[in-house]
Image (cartoon, coloured by chain):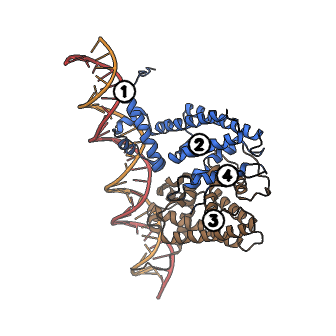
Chain colours: A brown, B blue, C orange, D red
Amino acid sequence: MTSPPRTLRADAVRNRAILLEAAEKEFAERGPGASVADIARRAGVGKGTVFRHFASKDELIAAIVHMHISVLDATGRRLLTTADPGAALYEFLTAAAAQREQQDVSFLLTADDASAEVVALREQLYATIGALVDRAREAGAIRPDVTTTDVVLLMCAPNHVVSFVKDPPPDLWRRYLALIFDGLRPEGAHPLGPPPAPL
Amino acid sequence: MTSPPRTLRADAVRNRAILLEAAEKEFAERGPGASVADIARRAGVGKGTVFRHFASKDELIAAIVHMHISVLDATGRRLLTTADPGAALYEFLTAAAAQREQQDVSFLLTADDASAEVVALREQLYATIGALVDRAREAGAIRPDVTTTDVVLLMCAPNHVVSFVKDPPPDLWRRYLALIFDGLRPEGAHPLGPPPAPL
DNA sequence: GATCAAACGGACCGAGCGGTCACTTTGACC
DNA sequence: GGTCAAAGTGACCGCTCGGTCCGTTTGATC
């Protein structure tokens, strides 16, 4: 239990940030098979440095997941304070998809070997989404039978769907987000005509 | 150009079928990273036998994709002759999702290094889906702005969505198929209340 | 600027991968 | 049942990967 020193050296702090950014890009481009060596090369550091900061590749992945979930949760909490519950939920889903459009690491969420910290964070995000969904349901913006789990599961669909086309226009996912969200709405009106069609 | 003999030996025919089945299961369980050695072991043959039948792992994958697309296309063509165009499209999507529920190899479709034969087959399936979509649109069963590409891209979503939950009930995908399909319908009525919610 | 632990780097290791090959087994045909 | 090419086999090869290790460099502290 000899806890390591609390304060990192300046270069260590800098390299850790560079590494996370490089790993994020590498995973987004090459998928989960991206190699640690490539990540190190992209960051301009030695491979050993990667393992100094993260005990294993899985731990590096966990750190990235941690980042993404944190940002998303903060966005969700902010939207809980806005006026229109339906718009808030839609905006949250838009933010989530937009985040993944830049760096799609959604495949990392499947990892069920997550650390306790990541699990806790995930549950917190789940609770935040639950609050958004409850508000939207009470406001009649979505069907009464739509659950939090439904929204969580459907959340990643727009990006995944778009991933099948070779060079998707950068906002194609908006079309599928609109289409899918419409499936969650009650019998009433369709709000906005979906964005331009592909091909 | 010394073309190989036309007729396979009896044991070769048998082993080829066993191999395809084993590979299908192995890919469905372990994803695209499933190893050729494991597939051979599961089929009860030597690793060399795999490469006698399929020149490379990619060619084995292509053969499986070929099978799946063929079956799906046949189903689609059959449904083109039925009475209700909206129901036909919905039934087609149900069949596609049901097929993937047993053996989800949808990730193999992303492979853009496909052989000419697979590409041709894929285009044929695309045409069949296009016909189903056109019929449904003309019958007013889906929105006028929904394209064939939309349907193709959304086709895999129900299974993918479900893949996030650990032990999904075997027909959970039906819920998300219904939800997503509702998003494609025109302003009018929602047809059937979606199947039971998760959790 | 001397000191020293923290941080860095890259050669190195074992495991697992796709794919090959020389040898053995087997089924079709007479 | 004898023959022979087709089919099967598993040790083997080259390569890449995650992870380790130890000699070197660097930044904080005085």
Same chain, marks 4 and 2? yes
One can see residue B153 in this view: yes
Q: Which amino acid does label 3 sit on?
A: Thr
Name the element at disc 2: helix
Per the image, the residue denoted by label 1 is: B10
The chain identifier of the residue carrying mark 1 reads B
Q: What residue type is labelled 2?
A: Ala
Q: Position of residue A194 (x, y in %)?
A: 76, 52
Per the image, the residue denoted by label 3 is: A148
Label 4 with label 1: CB-CB less than 8 Å: no
Q: Residue B180 carries which label?
A: 4
Mark in the foreground, 3 or 2:
2
Q: B55 left or right of A87?
A: left
Q: Distance between the residues labelled 1 and 2?
A: 33 Å
Q: Position of residue B15 (x, y in %)?
A: 38, 33
Name the element at disc 3: helix
Quarter of the figure with the N terminus of chain A: bottom left
Label 1 with label 2: CB-CB less than 8 Å: no
The chain identifier of the residue carrying mark 2 reads B
Label 4: how many Cα within 10 Å (few below 14, some 14–19, many 20+): many
Per the image, the residue denoted by label 2 is: B95
Name the element at disc 1: helix
Q: Where is residue A147 in the image (x, y as percent from the top left)?
A: 64, 64
